[in-house]
Image (cartoon, coloured by chain):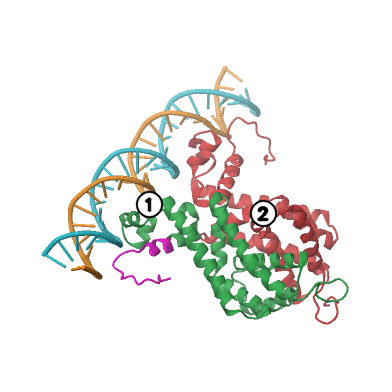
Chain colours: A red, B green, C orange, D cyan
Amino acid sequence: MDSPDVKKNKGISKDQWLVKALELLVSNGFEAVKIERLAKLLGTSRSGFYWHFKNRQDLLQHLLDFWALEYTSVLIDDLDIKKLPADKRLLSVMKMIRDHKLAKYDLAMNAWAQVDPLVDEIVQRVVKMRLDFSREIFVELGFVGDELEMRTRLFTCYHAWEGVMFADADQDKNLRLQTLRHKMFLTPSSSAGCGVQV
Amino acid sequence: MDSPDVKKNKGISKDQWLVKALELLVSNGFEAVKIERLAKLLGTSRSGFYWHFKNRQDLLQHLLDFWALEYTSVLIDDLDIKKLPADKRLLSVMKMIRDHKLAKYDLAMNAWAQVDPLVDEIVQRVVKMRLDFSREIFVELGFVGDELEMRTRLFTCYHAWEGVMFADADQDKNLRLQTLRHKMFLTPSSSAGCGVQV
DNA sequence: TTTCAACTGGACACTACTGTACAGTACGCC
DNA sequence: GGCGTACTGTACAGTAGTGTCCAGTTGAAA
């Protein structure tokens, strides 16, 4: 949450405006991101806002970059550093998505992308990054061609939205289902034997 | 789109307000559903609005019911009538979700549900209806227990969001992947043999 | 000690939107 | 022809939000 460069809390920093704006975006949609509301929530007046941002449009642009960086690039880099074996990496991706509650951010960003082509472009780029990351894992597991692509999409899509659809479900059951799902994704679905396509 | 009871187009009907409101909700989020905007879009003044609805809150409430009915109950009933064999029904569900572009409505409703507990309640009820519908299919296919639940969730979640994540992808490839996915959902994932758990 | 960046609040003019009120109109029915 | 239903536009008062200007404060660095 804290920015890397040390800020004495003498005022409201640019990042503080962004974090609150992201909060509002996530909970109420981009039309709800109002400067006056942000100021009220931060317990200050609007004037400081115009020090950091040109106007509302400028804030929204920065918000988009902020999300793409904080909630995708940083997390993917984090997973890349560890370089676990493929099947463990699959599990750690699932855990990361859950822990960071990425689904609710995705929800807001995708909704926003419906109107703004610029937002859509960034969102599509993020989706591509995620697909590429997952695909690499399934390549290591020995999948190729359409089978590889199908699994990559199914895995990425399910885990992106699981948090939205089954939020309040029973944790114990969730863990059992996750184990089963993990097994399903690992098991090759050849019709005859059970060998991996090569 | 037309309401069943015949309306002479002498004015803006309640359904016309609702349809436009749903449009605005889907594209810009619930905060964007403004009476003045609707009136402008419909080429009329706001006064007619207050004939049909008590106020903005009343419209939003009706909008919720409108969606739950038009985009879930009606469609599920439609699929139920046909009573195709389970594996064909699985395919027709996939097709229906795509054809009606349910994903973009889901997106808006889920985003809205993040703030309003009443909306969340309806959305959860709709999710439950869909899960129940899919589960029945997988029961007919011979799945039970956790394996049944895992497949039901994976299937429902993937198809609900596929349209958002992979909107502009190549149709030919999509069809090939769908066939593969269909096979994967039908094939039991037993570790030893390939028999269905009974 | 001054200077500057990073703020602060207050005031202004403006637009968007809300709910209410009210008078008028166009159609269908008895 | 008159009545009711289903609208229509206009006007008003009020709130929320925008961007701009400006004068003041505060902490660190030179």
Q: Residue A54: where, in percent of width, then height?
A: 50, 45
Quarter occupied by residue B36? bottom left
Nearest to viewer (mark 1 / mark 2) = 1
The image shows residue A2, relative to residue A142, as above or below, that is above
Amino acid at pointer 2: Ala
- Name the residue: 50% across, 41% down: A37
Q: Which mark is residue A167?
A: 2
- Name the residue: 76% across, 69% down: B144
Please say whether residue B18 is visible from this viewpoint. yes
Q: CA distance from mark 1 to mark 2?
A: 34 Å
Quarter occupied by residue A82? bottom right
Q: Which residues are magenta?
A: B1-20
From the image, which quarter does the C terminus of chain B lie in?
bottom right
The image shows residue B174, relative to residue A167, as above or below, that is below
Amino acid at pointer 1: Lys
- Name the residue: 67% across, 76% down: B178
Q: Is residue B90 left or right of residue A79?
A: left
Q: Residue A1: where, in percent of width, then height?
A: 67, 41
Please say whether residue B174 is visible from this viewpoint. no
